[in-house]
Image (spheres, grey):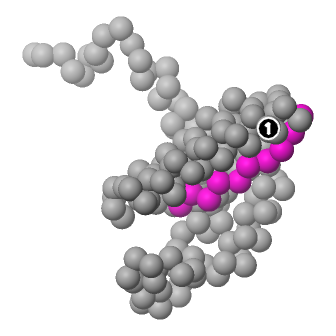
Amino acid sequence: EKAVAINVLAPTRLASAAAKAFVGRGGGAIINICSVLALNPERTNGVYAGSKSYLLSLTQALHEEGKGKGLKLQAVLPGLTRTEIMDRVGKDINAFPPSVLMEVDDLVDAALVGFDRGELVTIPSLPEAADWNALETARQKLFPNLSRNRPADRYRLA
C-alpha cells in the first residue's frame, strides 16, 4: 500500500493538479522520476515495477493531453542510483557492481540535459537514444492492431 501511495496516488494527484494549474497560467513543467524497471518489470517485484510503469504511462498521457497548452513533461528512468532507498529495502548498495551504480549528481545532471533537449523520456544510462526511439516506434506501430472487431487470424480455431 505504501508503494502504491508513493508511486501512484501521490504523483497522480500532484501531476493532475499541477497540469491543470500550469495549463491555466499558460505553461509549466512536470518531471516524474520513474525507473528503468518500468521497462523491465521481471527484474523486481510486481508492485514496484507496476507502479513505475504507471508513472511512465501517466507522463506520456499527460504529455499528449498538454500538447499546445504550454505543458512540458519528462519521465526520468534511472537505473540503480546511490541513494538510501536500498537501505530502506534491506539491501546493501555496495553489493552492486560499481559499473551499474550511478551517482545522484550525475543522474540529476543527465536528467536536466534531457529536459533541456525536450526529451519526454530520459534514460540517463542509455548510450544510444536511437534504442529508445526504436522501442517507441515499435510500440506505436502496434496501435492500429490493438483494437479490432474480431480476433486476429492467429487465434482462429483450426
For residue 82, what is the image quadrant? bottom right
Tag 1's secondary structure?
helix
Looking at the image, residue 77 lies above or below residue 95: above
Spot occupied by residue 119 in the image (x, y as percentages of width and height): 74, 50
Q: Quadrant of the C terminus?
A: top left
Spot occupied by residue 127 in the image (x, y as percentages of width and height): 64, 66
Is residue 101 shown left or right of residue 73? left
Q: Residue furthest right?
A: 26
Looking at the image, residue 96 lies above or below residue 15: below
Residue ID at (57%, 80%): 83
Looking at the image, residue 85 lies above or below residue 129: below
Magenta run includes residue 33: yes
Residue flagged by tag 1: what amino acid is it?
Answer: Ala
Asked whether residue 135 appears in the rendered view, the answer is: no
Spot occupied by residue 64 in the image (x, y as percentages of width and height): 68, 31
Which residue, given by chain and number where applicable, does mark 1 sit on?
A: 21
Which portion, as a residue range, is magenta? 26-35
Which is nearer the eye, 84 or 102? 84
